[in-house]
Image: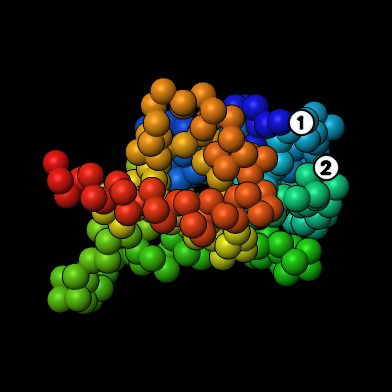
Amino acid sequence: MATILDGHRIILFGDSITQFSFEECGWGAQIQNVYQRRADVVCRGYSGYNTRWALQLLPNFSESPGIVTSVVTVFFGANDASLLAINPQQHVPLDEYSQNLKTIVDTLRAKFPSAEVILVTPPPIDDEAVLAGRIGATRNNTSAGKYAAAVAAVGVEMSAPVVNLWTSMQAAAPLVTHSTQEEASSAGNSASTAEVTDWRGFLSDGLHLTAAGQRFVGTQIVACINAARPDLAVHCNPLGGSFGNSGSESALIADGPWYDQVTDPLNFADLLTSTLFTNDAEGPAAATFNLLVYPLLEMEREVRYLTI
């Protein structure tokens, strides 16, 4: 029998950009919002770490009884790409970085056989901003691009999905020149980039993410999960956009019935322990609920709303 703490898990493994992913508007919090009551998102971000140090953490990862790790994101490279002459402590040579990523992917796949391991490239670097701030000349966009390309190559070799932030951020909001400003004003901004003038607006200090950058990363990673694992996709309620009510749809069974699925409040305990609403919900019983019972409950809910 499953318990309320059992079910699916998503692990975010990376450096400071992952560690900060549950800040206000954080991309990790955005993923947890999508998976309300369907999966627990666990943040394992280590500020300042590179892949060399990440390898030392892998023995601490393991599957837990009753838990199925469905996704692991691997988001390292911003520190590995540090310039050797200025920041030898964090720098990892490109060839070693690629090999480290392969080892990380292999190890995570062995530890979590049901998981989709997703690689995330380092974001672009705003050279002017890092020079002007506390980060200094330890990094530049050219180096970040080389490490992003290495991630993409490892993804192809390992058949692992890749979220290429270095490319997608710069493509979504190109650097603004006089001509591109005129083009943008005539064409209108897209919803995904309306908050920023150009891609540098995704970065707070030239490296870490602003609120707009956090939202961009979260959107990209959720899209990658949906493409790689459609069985894990959660579709929001078209009325209001919520991922956390009975109008949202997913093959993942929510933990406990939604409030408007409780047709008999006096027998709620029996409903709560039913396999129709727990993570044991597999096979004919769950199929019967999804195909027959759930639509009837939705019809009843709509009738109740119409008669209020």
* Percent of width and height locating residue 37: 50, 36
Residue at horizontal 42%, vertical 68%?
A: 171
- Judge whether residue 170 can be spotted in this image: yes
Amino acid under disc 2: Lys
- Mark 2, residue position: 111
Q: Which element carries disc 2, helix, strand or loop?
A: helix
Q: Position of residue 235 (x, y in %)?
A: 43, 56
* Crowd band around label 2 with a 10 angstrom C-alpha radius: few (<14), some (14–19), many (20+): some
User: Is residue 46 in view?
Assistant: no
Q: Is residue 42 above or below residue 112?
A: above
Seen in the image, is 68 located left or right of residue 200? right
Please tell me which residue is depicted at 51% across the width and 65% down the height of the picture: 167
CA distance separating discs 1 and 2: 10 Å
Labelled disc at residue 64: 1
Quadrant of image for the N terminus: top right
Q: First in sequence: mark 1 or mark 2?
A: 1
